[in-house]
């Protein structure tokens, strides 16, 4: 009789049974939680991508300077004094855009480096 009670408490499984009542499948198994080491490796991938962006940006800046005589004509140093023409720092829109992109990438890189150090100590990597 106990066998009949145990069998009756098991819900029938069919093609139309929803996943809440059925046995675990790939769809309803919870994902494995991320470890500090996983987050560290993901951060490392992001950091390498930002390093590639930074090198491309620096290459673009160098190309611009080479195309324009290799010298930044916006400022002049004479006898230890720094001189700048009025409005010269805002005068070249292409250079301003390249420098703005360079600064944005440096900020992003700095944030990733700080996070990288935190994750490295959390994961126990020396």
Image (spheres, rainbow, N blue to C red):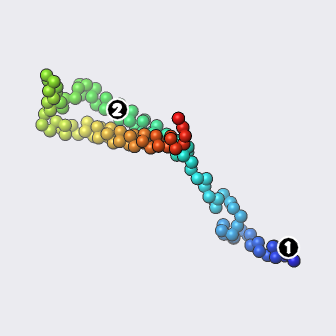
Judge whether residue 105 can be spotted in this image.
no
Q: Is residue 73 left or right of residue 104?
A: left
Q: Which residue is painted at 81% across and 73% down in the image?
A: 7
Number of on-image labels: 2
- For this orientation, the residue located farthest to the left is 86
Whether residue 115 is visible, yes or no, is yes
The residue under label 2 is 58
Secondary structure at numbered mark 1: helix
The secondary structure type at the circle numbered 2 is helix
Residue 26 position by quadrant: bottom right
Q: Give the residue at the far right of this rendering.
A: 1
30 in relation to 75, above or below: below
Q: Earlier in the sequence, mark 1 or mark 2?
A: 1
Q: Find residue 15 and report its horizontal and vertical position in percent.
A: 71, 68
Looking at the image, is 68 positioned above or below residue 46? above
Towards the viewer: 112 or 62: 112
Position of residue 33 measured from the top left corner of the image (x, y, whole percent): 58, 53
Residue count near mark 2 (Cα–Cα under 10 Å), binned few <14, some 14–19, many ≥20: some
User: Residue 36 versus residue 28: which sits nearer the camera?
Assistant: 36
Residue at image position (62%, 58%) is: 30
Q: Residue at x 66, y 66 (%)?
A: 19
Image position of 66 (left or right of 116): left
Q: Which residue is mark 1?
A: 3
The structure residue drawn at horizontal position 53% and vertical position 35%, both measured from the top left corner, is: 126
Q: CA distance from mark 1 to mark 2?
A: 76 Å
Left or right: 32 as drawn, with respect to 87: right
């Amino acid at each position: 009789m106990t066998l009949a009670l145990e069998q009756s408490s098991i819900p029938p499984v069919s093609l139309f049974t929803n996943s809440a009542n059925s046995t675990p499948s790939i769809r309803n198994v919870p994902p494995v939680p991320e470890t500090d080491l996983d987050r560290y490796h993901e951060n490392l991938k992001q950091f390498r991508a930002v390093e590639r962006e930074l090198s491309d940006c620096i290459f673009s800046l160098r190309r611009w300077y080479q195309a324009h005589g290799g010298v930044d004509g916006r400022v002049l140093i004479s006898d230890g004094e720094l001189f700048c023409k009025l409005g010269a720092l805002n005068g070249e829109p292409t250079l301003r855009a390249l420098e703005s992109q360079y600064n944005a990438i440096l900020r992003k890189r700095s944030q990733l480096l700080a996070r990288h150090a935190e994750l490295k100590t959390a994961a126990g990597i020396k």
